[in-house]
Each structure stands twice: as structure tokens, then as C-alpha cells.
Amino acid sequence: MFAQLVWKDLQKGAHPKRLQLGRPGLPAEMVLRATILKQMNGFSYEQLAFHLADSRTYLRFCGFTHPLEVPGKSALAHNIKCISGETWEQINHLLGRYAQAQGVEDGRKLRIDPTVSETNIHHPTDNALLFDCVKTLARILARAHESFDVPFRNRSRRAKKRHMAIVNARNQAQRLQPYRDLLQITRETIRYARQAREPLRKDAGPFAGLARRFADRLDHYLPLAEQVVSQTQRRVFHGDSVPADEKLVSIFEPHTDIIRKDGRDTYYGHKVTLTGGKAGSFSTGSWKPAIPPTSRSSSACSIVTASITVTIRARSPPTVPSRARTISKMPGSAA
């Protein structure tokens, strides 16, 4: 049953014309088992491909008969990423019902654990974000220039030099001039991107689909680049303190929130609340919008209480310490 759910996702992620071409794809059960190994050991896709070919146990667990049958890291990544979040939720519900039928979980006790799930981004600094904008837009424009001859002058090398000059500067005064130059380079690249959008979108040649994809990518990154320029101008040259809910910390993961823990540590990601049973099995998970770090009312206690109200539906949620792990009875269960 699990493999059938994964198979539906794999069919959705496959291009119709490619189903009859190239090497046969991986069976759904192989993809599911490889995903379990990846998550269980914390492997990257490169490490997963290596250990699948290196370990006879992993090889047999996934259903391969020879190390040469193991696909590369790119093929593994493509197949695993096809599995949707809805499918994982259905698999988790099926596992929960199976655990209850086998007597592993009785549903009477739950453990609530709020934590932070960090996104895969580098540490956000103004100069690093500006450099990300320049090199990303320049990469798209360079390919569009090669294919459709859109006007473009690549400033990536100059932007990298200014980025490194800011990193190696001894004080803020030495950073101002490189920041001005880096902002100018970013604005120039943004102008090239704006000019290229309309010709790419109106292209009616044999490669019009490719031109529209370039235009769509420019439409995605241009507002993010403009936001980075705006917040850098405010922070570096005007001395303003940009509110956390207005900051952009990554153009690749723009949904990332800024999370302060106990007023000390800063994390970049999302607040999540995990619910598990007494046997340690995962039950449910919920994502909570981040509270700006300027608000001192954001404590783990308030997050846990909200999670109890939504997940367990208790009439009067208990108050728990900020660092405590809570065990609660399900409503309507026997004492």
C-alpha cells in the first residue's frame, strides 16, 4: 500500500514523453526504501548513492542485486523529491493505525515537542545576499543571452571582489565604499533582468517555451533582489533597524523565518510542533508561523499550549514550563 502511494507521485513527476525513453525508472518500493535509509542515517544524496553500492545490507534492503544497478545521486534525488508531503502524511496515518492495531500505541498518551527546523541556507549577511542576487540573475541572463541574444554584461567577478572586500574589511568605515559599488552592480544587473523579461516572454520562435521559462525565473528572483537592495540600503547607509517580519534572509528559501530562542540563539527556519506516542512513534506534526524576535511573549510554553489545543483538542490546556516535555491524555479515553 505504501508503494502504491509513492508510485502515484512518481507518475506525476515524470514527463509523459520520457516514460517511453531512456533507462527504466526505479520501482516505487525501491524509492521508498532508499528514502527510509537516507532519513534514518542523515545521508546526503551523494552519501546515499555511495552507501547503497558499498553496503550489501543496504543493497538487499532496497532490492538491488548488484552495486552497478544503484543509480547516481541525481537520479536518487529526482525520485525521492517526487514524494509529496501529502503522501508522507498518508503513510504516517497508516503506520499509526497499524501500531494501534498491534497494541504498540493505544492513543491515550501523547508527547508534545516544539522545536525549530532550520532551512538549508548560509548565514545571511547583506553583502552575501547581494552577491547571491547578482550571480543568480547573471546565470539566468547569461544563458538567455547565449540562446536569444538579450543585452547583458556580466558583473559577477566584480561583485565577488566587492563581496570579499566587505568580508575582509577591518571596520564599518572600510565597508562603505565596497557596499556602494556592490549595490550599484546589483542595481545594474536588475536593470538588465527587467529589460530582458518582455522580449523573452514575447518570443514566438521554435524555442519559445525555453524563453518563457527564463522569463518566469526572472519574475521569481527580481522582487527578491529588489527587497535585498532595499533592506541593505536601509541597514547599511541609513542605520535603520529592519523588522524581522520584513527581512529576507535567503533568495533561495524566501519562506525562512527568523527565530530567537530564549533571547540568546538565532535560528533560520520554521517552528514545528511534533506529537508522538508513548512508544516513541511519530504521530503528527504542525508548522507554526514564527513570532518576530522583538516580541518577548514568544515562549515555548505558549507554543505547546496552542499545539495541545489544536492537536489534542483539550478543553483546558495545562500550563507547562518552557523547557518541559508534556505527556497528556487523549480526551474521551479511559482513565
Image (spheres, rainbow, N blue to C red):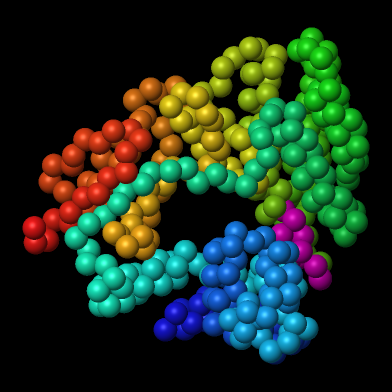
Q: Position of residue 132 (x, y in %)?
A: 75, 39
Q: Which residues are magenta?
A: 206-215
Most foreground residue, 202 or 217? 217
Image height check: is 18 above or below 161? below
Residue 313 visible in image: no
Looking at the figure, which quarter contains the C terminus? bottom left
Most foreground residue, 305 or 163? 305
Image height check: is 227 above or below 84? above
Query: Total label count?
Result: 0
Q: Position of residue 205 (x, y in %)?
A: 81, 67
Image height check: is 283 above or below 187? below
Residue 309 visible in image: yes
Residue at 78% x, 32% y: name it.
Answer: 186
Residue at 13% x, 42% y: name it.
Answer: 316
Secondary structure character of the magenta stretch overall: helix
Residue at 70% x, 14% y: name it.
Answer: 237
Looking at the figure, which quarter contains the N terminus? bottom left
Does residue 168 show up magenta in the picture? no
Name the image quarter holding residue 97.
bottom left
Image height check: is 61 above or below 253? below
Is 291 positioned to the left or the right of 186 in the image? left
Q: Position of residue 94 (x, y in %)?
A: 35, 74
Is 201 positioned to the left or the right of 60 in the image? right
Name the image quarter holding residue 323.
top left
Residue at 87% x, 39% y: name it.
Answer: 156
Q: Position of residue 144 (x, y in %)?
A: 83, 54
Is 190 positioned to the left or the right of 274 in the image? right
Name the image quarter holding residue 277.
bottom left
